[in-house]
Image (cartoon, rainbow, N blue to C red):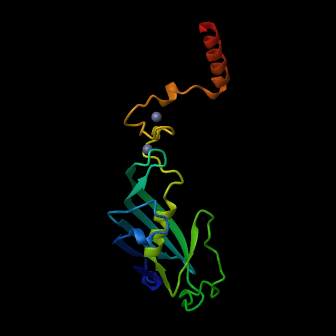
Amino acid sequence: MHLQLDQARNGPFRWRDAVRVAAADLRRDEALVPDGVDCEGSLTFTGPDFLLQTRLRYRHRLRCDRCLTAYEEDVDLPLAFVVTADVVDGPPAADGAGDGHGARELEPEDLSTLAAVDGAVDLFRLVCEQVELNVPMKPTCDPGCRGLCPQCGVDRNRKACACVAERVDPRWAGLEAVRERLADNLSS
Ligand SMILES: [Zn+2]
Ligand SMILES: [Zn+2]
């Protein structure tokens, strides 16, 4: 889906669309978006640039970094971008508010800038990039997830294992050997 900048020349252009995102569309394979992305927004001509405001709502499926279980999470992502008309064939601003595309009046630091290509914004690409960016570095199914036991591999959220209790603290391993030797001497 492409958003034509010209659609906003005579007033804000609003849209709402369901964007299907397949696993192959994403460069990161940690995330899946099984139900697609509900994408709504508006494009406003601010001269010479455009303001793109959008809200993405979807449910992504991730794999927990600690217990490796797949889990789902709802995402509600409000976004705003300054869209600059491309230099190649972008029509000059109608109100004469500067003929230079080099004019960068509207560039607050909290807004990302997007460059339009052939007078349009590729919304599909934008959605895919945002889904990718929104995958956490270390996804966790729950802040209290206890993860897998590093020794026996059991999911410690589901089952308790005795590994930690049985294991001798390595700092005491030397003493343990001495104690065994003493015990042998005493019994002989
Ligand atoms: Zn987990
Ligand atoms: Zn264990």
User: Which residue is pictured at 41% across the width and 63% down the height?
Assistant: 56
Residue 96 in the figure: left or right of residue 163: right
Seen as rendered, the residue at the extreme front is 188
Nearer to us in this view, 122 or 156 = 156
User: Which residue is pictured at 37% across the width and 66% down the height?
Assistant: 37
Residue 58 in the figure: left or right of residue 52: left
Nearer to us in this view, 117 or 65 = 65
Q: Position of residue 6 (x, y in %)?
A: 45, 85
Tell me the quarter of the picture where residue 177 sits: top right
- In which of the image's four quarters is ligand 1 placed? top left
Q: Position of residue 72 (x, y in %)?
A: 37, 52
Q: Position of residue 133 (x, y in %)?
A: 52, 62
Tell me the quarter of the picture where residue 188 sits: top right
User: Which residue is pictured at 64% across the width and 25% down the height?
Assistant: 173
10 versus 169 height, above or below: below
Nearer to us in this view, 174 or 59 = 174
Q: Position of residue 34 (x, y in %)?
A: 34, 63
Q: Quadrant of the N terminus?
A: bottom left
The total number of labels drawn is 0
